[in-house]
Amino acid sequence: MIHLSHPQPSIALIELDAAPANVLAMAERARLLKAFAAVEAERAVRVVILTGRNGAFCTGDDLAEALIRDADTQSAAILHFLEMCDRVAVCRVPVIAAIDGWCIGGGLELALACDIRLASDRASFACSAVRMGLTASAGRLTKLIGESRAKPHLLTGAPFDAARALADGVAAEVHPAADLLGAALAMAGVIASRAPLAIEATKRVASGVSTTEVEIPGLAATADHAEARAAFMGKRPAVFAGR
């Protein structure tokens, strides 16, 4: 199952729940995409947290389902998984991955599609595609942490822990498992308090799909920018309306 909730009106929480390890069979992928489509349609939502239940983040494709696919169907299913990750990556608002437990194979690709990754101290990562005769994460991981750091993970498929993920820049922060969701909610709350149009524009620029020169003229004309200037002069918190 995929659970979509709103801890705050401006924060959406999407939880993977396919025990025991949150694999994403075709039906689960459709539910995940539906959840993201619902988030996109809610203008009040300013940030998304993606996490997993059952002591795992995600372990990628459902291998039991994969065993009954022929070669063509399997190829299409793998490409569909990557397209799903692409869809997460271009979500209108920032996506925070809260990673507890296993984050391997396609699950790591999904985490890399998010804007920010927070990990628990018991998180375990692996670029396991090479162990399955496939390739995954080579593009996103290399872009994120650089070739020299990415290739040992990509070419060995060896698991690595949260401390290594933090050191290599895969994770932005590491927290005790019991505190992980709270840390993600705290970060989401800070992001949600900022000017939403500016947050969306900044995500586009940082992701390489736009430029500052393209975004600035529109942002400078927004009511939010005027509110920020007035709030600064009035020595009060700004109240952003997203317009």
Image (spheres, grey):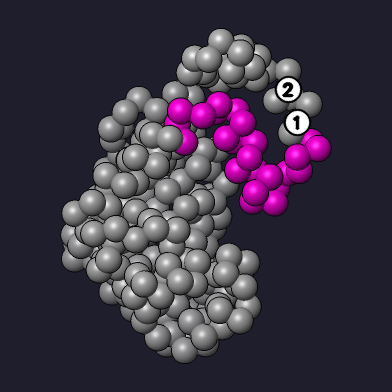
Badges 1 and 2: C-beta atoms under 8 Å apart?
yes
Work out whether 67 lies above or below 18. below
> Would you say 222 lies left or right of 152 here?
right
> Would you say 142 lies left or right of 99 here?
right
What residue sits 34% from the left and 61% below the top?
174
Work out whether 55 lies above or below 206. below
Q: What stretch of residues is rendered in magenta?
A: 191-214
One can see residue 61 in this view: no
Q: Nearest the camera: 10 or 130? A: 10
Q: Nearest the camera: 77 or 235? A: 235
For the residue labelled by badge 1, is the local secondary structure a helix, a strand or a loop?
helix
Work out whether 152 lies above or below 50. below
* Residue 135 percent location from the top left of the image: 53, 79
Q: Amino acid at mark 2?
A: Ala
> Would you say 182 lies left or right of 95 here?
left
Q: Residues within 10 Å of mark 2 (few under 14, many from 20)?
A: few
* Residue 24 percent location from the top left of the image: 34, 61
The numbered dot on residue 216 is 1
The numbered dot on residue 243 is none
Tell me the CA gap for discs 1 and 2: 6 Å
Which residue in the protein does label 2 denote? 220
* Residue 121 percent location from the top left of the image: 27, 66
Work out whether 200 lies above or below 138. above
What residue sits 63% from the left and 40% below the top?
202
